[in-house]
Image (cartoon, rainbow, N blue to C red):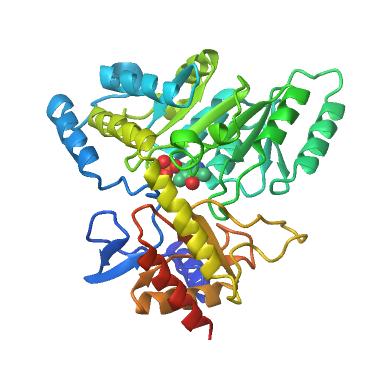
Amino acid sequence: MPFSTLHSALNERAATGLLRTRRTVSSPPSPHIIVDGKSYLSFCSNDYLGLANHPQLIAALQQGAQQWGVGSGASHLVSGHTVAHQQLEIELAKFVDKPAALFFSSGYLANLGAVQALVGRGDTVFADKLNHASLNDAMLLSRASIKRYRHNDVAHLALLLQQSAGSHKGTMTGRKLIITDAVFSMDGDIAPLPELLALCEQHDAWLLIDDAHGFGVLGKQGRGSVAHYFLDNPRIIYMATLGKAAGVSGAFVAAEQVVIDTFLQTARSYIYTTASPPALTSALIASLGLIEQDDWRRTQLQKLIAQLRAGLQSLPWKLHCPLVGHCPPVGLPSDTPIQPLIVGENNAVLELSNALRERGIWIPAIRPPTVPPGTARLRISLSAAHSGCDVAQLITALHELAR
Ligand SMILES: *Cc1c(COP(=O)(O)O)cnc(C)c1O
């Protein structure tokens, strides 16, 4: 039976500390959650602003369901596209100061659709080696040729762009797309967007920015990483997800009108899927309002980040990869709510994660292939909903376990 090969593959994963498991949560999103009947202090959510259980968002979703029902009933190009979706897209485009936006059901789908609509055979994608899995899958699916540059290494990217210009002499018609996470999801460091954009200008390329972890957190009023760097350029194709800091679900791509018009024709992950429930858009519009208004949430986050970094300084494990200069080269200390504690070996990080869990603290162990071999880590993520006491409790527990 072919099942035996599945069994042995699973056993092999288990033996190398790589078996993935789920735990089942029985409480709403919060730093204090209940898992298997036991209460935990959690540092694993991407609900960075603490909006996922906000009373105003809950009320908006209820009101949206009253008005629109619970399902959209069809894809956007059939009959699933409502005034509610349209309104949301207008608000999203305005929020990130772009001419147009398209709302997708998830970030994974947005990345698949955007990359595949922009490039194909004969085109070239240049991608950071630590990009999110969805961007990696997207470029494979697009059939464009792929050049991966060392993490945040602008000089390496420049070299690859130059080489590809040389090799295409005479047939310089291929499109070029540079794609990067804005805030790297497992390291928390920020991509050098101004330098990447300068290379786009020089080589007539587009820049697709995945701001899953910057939207709501970075920039004035949480407008994201592009606002953080004060960039404004039609070459930027801006993608952000709405299930993380925005606290709801879905994602969007904002860009020039012609780009969005193109997506509507050819982004398969937009076309061939049922439109998200229109009621979600009510919650999302309420969320945009809170993201814009509530600067105190970002201030609280920065306070907690500083507290954590200061508190963990003397640990044997570091809050960024200690292998700088090695391959793969790795990020700088993070100024974002993603704070990776690099432990190294898979089983060591599992042990640490388990020991924390015994003390009532929940932080997931992130292992290869999600991160490079030898850099297994605890991915600590902070939320404005955490208190200083929560972070102090984590710091104390880690110091005790380090002994
Ligand atoms: C979470 C994430 C995605 C996927 O977004 P979903 O809405 O969860 O599908 C894409 N890119 C990055 C960098 C992410 O962290």
Instruction: Quarter of the image for the N terminus: give it.
Output: bottom left
Residue 344 is left or right of residue 301, and the answer is right
Residue furthest out toward the bottom: 403
Instruction: Name the residue nearer the viewer: 189 or 171.
Output: 189
The x, y position of residue 243, in whole percent, is 37, 42
The x, y position of residue 50, in whole percent, is 33, 49
Instruction: Name the residue nearer the viewer: 53 or 130.
Output: 53
Q: Residue at x 54, y 32 (%)?
A: 227
Q: Residue at x 24, y 38 (%)?
A: 57
The x, y position of residue 163, in whole percent, is 84, 34
The x, y position of residue 266, in whole percent, is 50, 20
Q: Residue at x 59, y 70 (%)?
A: 313
Quadrant assignment, res 153: top right
Residue 315 is left or right of residue 91, and the answer is right
Please say if 160 is above or below 52. Answer: above
Please say if 303 is above or below 154. Answer: below
Please indicate, yes or no, whether residue 6 appears anywhere in the rendered image.
Answer: yes
Residue 179 is left or right of residue 77, and the answer is right
Please say if 74 is above or below 9. Answer: above
